[in-house]
Structures are given as structure tokens and as C-alpha cells.
Amino acid sequence: MDDTIEIESLEKDSHVPEQTILLVDDEPDILEFIGFNLMQAGYAVRSANNGQEGLELALEIKPDLILLDVMMPKMDGIEACIHIRKEPSLSHCLVAFLTARGEDYSQVAGFDSGADDYILKSIKPRVLTSRIKALLRRAKNISSELQLREHNGISIDRERYLVIQNGKKINLPKKEFELLSLLWSEPGKVFTRDSILTTVWGNDVIVGDRTIDVHIRKLRSKIGNKCIETVQGVGYKFDS
């Protein structure tokens, strides 16, 4: 057990509507401690002991957020996240890794698999709860209504989280969808890295430039290199 994870007595926020968080970790103490703090914060919490069990439970309960460990038996967190992102019924789910693996390559692998965040287990429970609230709040706030229209062969329906390119439906992880929606919303406009971070990830979620680059690279692999243009030293724009 990581002894930096500790129980804190958090006052339950009665104003927060109950949302479901799925914890997936092979350490019972972690499940108990983190689960306790999240329930104190007003969330409904379910748990699983490995990636395979977590995937099956996610398909059953359709949680709002899934917290995944990386190293687990039967199916590790990276593989589980890849499977989650392939499931249309889980397209609304946020996925964040909560792990002791802090290496750069592990974090890149996590974002490449479709994660919305990567959190180290050295985080204090109160800070973790704030981070989760920020993720869920950002996911809600960014779902602004956009009419279904077409730019460069791409149409986006935000209400159904639907991307259509030249008549073909494209399934995207949540953050990739939000990033594409932002750039697509104003074709030709250059969005700075700071504005992208603020709009898609929020001021209270700590991410770096590499996070944007990883998501842009993944988007280009799915919709083609011509749609998103890099403006050197500034940011990105959707080519109209």
C-alpha cells in the first residue's frame, strides 16, 4: 500500500448531484481508502480488482468516471482503457489513471490509450477529490450546444457526441472529441495552447504541452493531417 494515501474526513457536499465513479485497482486498501473519501464527497462508488472485471462492470453500470490503476492482473489499465474507448456505450465516461507509475513513457501510453487524466498516487485524497470535481465539471461545462454543420467534410453533434467525416462515423475519446469540437467550432481561428488548455482541461487541472500534442497526434491519425494545422509557436487551427 502506498502510505502517502491517507484517509481524510471530508464533509459531504449535499449540493453535488450523485455521480458514479468506478475504482479499478488490485490493492484492497487503495480501493477502501479512496472509495471512502469519494463517498464522503458525495459520489456513488463501485470497485473492481482488475482490468477485465473493471471493463465488465463499466459496461453494466455506465459510470461517469473510471479511475484505473496501470499494473493489474488479468488485464492492465492501459489495455482496459483501450477497450473502454472502443465501447460506444461508454463514450460519455471520463477515464483517469490513478497509479504509482510516474515515468514519462507510462503517462504518454496512458494518454495514447484514451485517458482524460493521469494522476499519481502520491496525491492527497482531498486534492484528488478536487481534481475529480474539476474533471466532471469541465466535462459538463464544455458540452455547449453546437448545431450540426459541416467544415472540411466533418460534422459534429455535441449532444450525441457524434463525429461524422464524409458520411463515416468516427468514435473519439472524450478529450479528443472536446479538442476537435473546439478547433472545429471556429475554422481558421488560431487557438493558442493556453486557450486550449483552459477550455478543454480547465485551470484547475494540471497538464502540460505534451498532453495537447499527444491528443492532436491521435486526432490526426483518425481524421487526417490536413484538417488540423500547426501554427508554429502559437497553437493550432482547424483548416476551413
Image (spheres, rainbow, N blue to C red):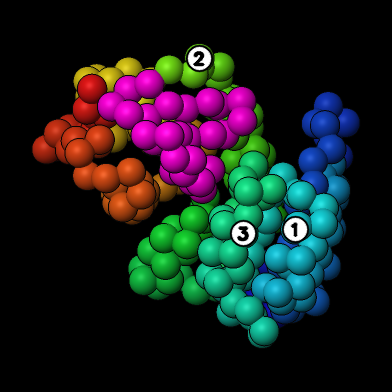
Mark nearest the camera among 2 and 3 is 2
Seen at 39% across and 35% down, the residue is: 165
Query: In the image, residue 183 lies at what x, y percent?
Result: 34, 28
Task: For marks 2 and 1, give the CA distance.
Answer: 30 Å
Residue 167 included in the magenta stretch of the image? yes
Which mark, by number, is residue 84? 3
Crowdedness of circle 2 by 10 Å Cα count: few (<14), some, many (20+)? few
Seen at 43% across and 34% down, the residue is: 167
Q: Quadrant of the C terminus?
A: top left
In the picture as drawn, the residue positioned furthest to the front comes out as 167
Residue identified by numbered label 2: 147
Q: Which residue type carries mark 3?
A: Ile
89 vs 165, left or right, is right
84 vs 56, left or right, is left
In the picture, residue 73 is in which quadrant?
bottom right
Crowdedness of circle 3 by 10 Å Cα count: few (<14), some, many (20+)? many
The part of the chain drawn in magenta is: 150-179
In the picture, residue 85 is in which quadrant?
bottom right
Query: In the image, residue 114 lies at what x, y percent?
Result: 49, 56
- Earlier along the polypeptide chain: callout 1 or callout 3? 1
| 2 and 1 marks in contact (CB < 8 Å) | no
Task: For marks 2 and 3, give the CA distance.
Answer: 28 Å
